[in-house]
Image (tube, coloured by chain):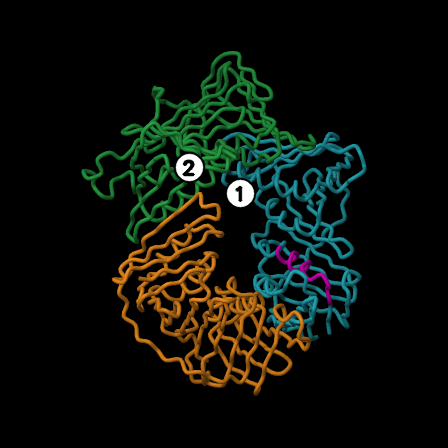
Chain colours: A green, B cyan, C orange
Amino acid sequence: MFEAKLDQGSLLKKLVDAIKELCTEVNWEVSSQGLSMQAMDSSHVCLVALTLLKEGFQHYRCDRPLTLGINLANLAKILKCAGNDDAITMKADDNGDTLTLMFESEKQDRISDFDLKLMSIEVEQLGIPDQEYSAEAQIPSSEYQRIVRDLASIGDTVIISATKEGIKFATTGDIGTANVTLRHASTSDRPEGQTHVTLHEPVAQTYALRYLNNFAKASPLSTSVKVSLSKDIPIVVEYRISDVGFIKYYLAPKIDEEEENEGGDENQ
Amino acid sequence: MFEAKLDQGSLLKKLVDAIKELCTEVNWEVSSQGLSMQAMDSSHVCLVALTLLKEGFQHYRCDRPLTLGINLANLAKILKCAGNDDAITMKADDNGDTLTLMFESEKQDRISDFDLKLMSIEVEQLGIPDQEYSAEAQIPSSEYQRIVRDLASIGDTVIISATKEGIKFATTGDIGTANVTLRHASTSDRPEGQTHVTLHEPVAQTYALRYLNNFAKASPLSTSVKVSLSKDIPIVVEYRISDVGFIKYYLAPKIDEEEENEGGDENQ
Amino acid sequence: MFEAKLDQGSLLKKLVDAIKELCTEVNWEVSSQGLSMQAMDSSHVCLVALTLLKEGFQHYRCDRPLTLGINLANLAKILKCAGNDDAITMKADDNGDTLTLMFESEKQDRISDFDLKLMSIEVEQLGIPDQEYSAEAQIPSSEYQRIVRDLASIGDTVIISATKEGIKFATTGDIGTANVTLRHASTSDRPEGQTHVTLHEPVAQTYALRYLNNFAKASPLSTSVKVSLSKDIPIVVEYRISDVGFIKYYLAPKIDEEEENEGGDENQ
């Protein structure tokens, strides 16, 4: 039996909103340690990894590991029925064919429960190697969201370069070119509203803006986002959910652009 | 001659918004007592009854009873031109072919007048019998609005059950099931923000969510709504407009669900 | 070389929003005096004239006159990437094939630069004669915006009449008629929130509402708008941009309505 309660149920709504456009059906793995998920997006281009530690829940119990096969659009429909201040409790029996969600209003005057049908989803688990990165930039999530949205209105791909001066995003499109630079803040106070670049060596890589833009749906989860870059390996865009866990997005760089056909499928 | 002035003209806007999606053309009956309307919705499934007492108007004069045949979409178009703080005066001659609406801004620096063409509409007047109900629930209108909207995203029909513990709304759809319970508040202070159930005998009936959802358009008119239930007779959803009158919606229950075709026309 | 900086970059966004739906491609003329533009709308019915004086810029330099051929939709796309509190610097080389826009956030922690490709646009310059008007009305821009929007929902053309009592807008449509009168304020205090009519002789002229409605897109630029009227010559709708310049819209009246075909092309 699995049972877990979040007093701040809006967190679960934000989490599902952060992944439901990339992935339609996912397996949530629940164990005595917490809840985790790893899924390729539906076009098999990027990977989403989610971890919620049991310590992040106000109540958590999981007698034996369970795989919960979830249609995220349906879960989102149900979570839309939760008030922003509702506590949310998730429950599943060991047969794992239903996820029960219980919403309680603060004043306990409204109680809702929903049974979501679960499904059996075939997925291959991918190993994600631990990695040292050439550059890691801590960016206000509102700035990240805005830059990738703005640049996506102009071009299809972005060159992200990290130097000790800061982190630069550059794109080119039909109407012209665009460069946005976030300057590294040398002061260490107010770190959340500023950009901090930790640099081992300068790096510049090209990525599809469409995906980077999609990752920004996680912005409501955290005031800042960490972008990790190394040559020829996937970028990691990570949102920490305070005291609870994190969500990480991985996207491979576009290598050797000259050989690519223009209008290749990832850009469309 | 008919002439009636509402200092709070926004009330008239809210009233028309509360009925214009259900009914396209209606007769407003004006008499020395006030203004009233009774109309079936365009699919002839539910009934809307409106009463505005003459005492609710800042000025009211009606020399002899008149029937004003109104296209509600056109009236709504005109009312959209009124500011929220405008006073609204309605006027009609005894021949009843035009309704004049005059809007005055608080500072009297803008004066608008609109002539709306009236029409002749054939309707049969239905008698609504006075009725004792098994259960009456006073619910915050925001809660009612939210519950029927949420459940309509999951299923087509709702079973509403009233017990002494409270009032429960239950639905079933493709993705699973949903139950929302509003608890009866035993305290009698702050009655408007709480749910109060007056129960003669427990009752449970099934209704089409689509219509209950439409009735919630009257929410801006009142902070609470009264839901009256009895076995095998129409539910009444009533919004009181303080000092002025009320709007009531009637909807017949779905009886003997087993015999119904799935996907029957009222659910679509 | 041309270089001009506006500390309040949002002004440029508002300006482009005020003309981009009327004109798709325009020439901006920059000289040592400032920036100006004059363009017919794409259906060749109305004329837009824009003047920004060099004194309105925080920094302004223009070595020799240049014509910048701009696609306004593309410029708007780039300006959407500027924060509302960003300073905006525009730059162009003497060959005039690119306009560089630089956005700086207040805290200087984000710097963006965009290169917009310019184009060669053939236009005939029209002389606009200086004119005395029979009536000039200073109107709160929010009132102008609202009246033309409201009346456009009812009819296609509006008769604007100026008398010493005020300025009246009248239209007729399928559903009825509408008249809105703004009263001339005799007091001279709080002039911006009030309507003031300066009258040489009473005048009443008919105009296409669709265009008057479009002119209201300039409302964010100024709290008041000046409407100038004379018999048989174009109406002028003018928004002053404090300390910087103005935008003026010219629209010819509809003369001899009886001879016009109903549903003529300007009304559609």
Please state the horizontal and vertical placement of residue C158, each as a whole percent of the image. Answer: 52, 75
Q: Residue furthest bottom?
A: C201
Which residue is rendered at x = 30% and y = 31% of the image? Answer: A252
In the image, taking residue A36 as reference, residue B160 lies left or right, namely right
Residue A19 visible here = no
Tell which subunit mark 2 falls on. A
With respect to residue A12, does C251 lie above or below?
below
With respect to residue B113, does A250 lie above or below?
above
With respect to residue C131, does A22 lie above or below?
above
Q: Are marks 1 and 2 in contact (CB under 8 Å)?
A: no
Please state the horizontal and vertical placement of residue A254, each as a whole percent of the image. Answer: 27, 35
Membership of B13 in magenta stretch: yes
Q: Nearer the viewer, residue C168 or B103?
A: C168
Tell which subunit mark 1 falls on. B
Which residue is rendered at x = 43% and y = 49% of the image? Answer: C104
Q: CA distance from mark 1 to mark 2?
A: 58 Å
Q: Nearer the viewer, residue A34 or A108?
A: A34
Membership of A11 in magenta stretch: no
Residues shaded magenta: B5-17
Which residue is rendered at x = 41% and y = 74% of the image? Answer: C46
Q: Amino acid at mark 1?
A: Asn
In the image, taking residue B38 as reference, residue B77 lies left or right, namely left
Q: Residue furthest left?
A: A259
Q: Amino acid at mark 2?
A: His
Query: In what element is the residue under mark 1?
Result: helix
Please state the horizontal and vertical placement of residue A136, each as a whole percent of the image. Answer: 39, 30
Q: How many marks?
A: 2
Residue picked out by circle 1: B267
Residue picked out by circle 2: A184
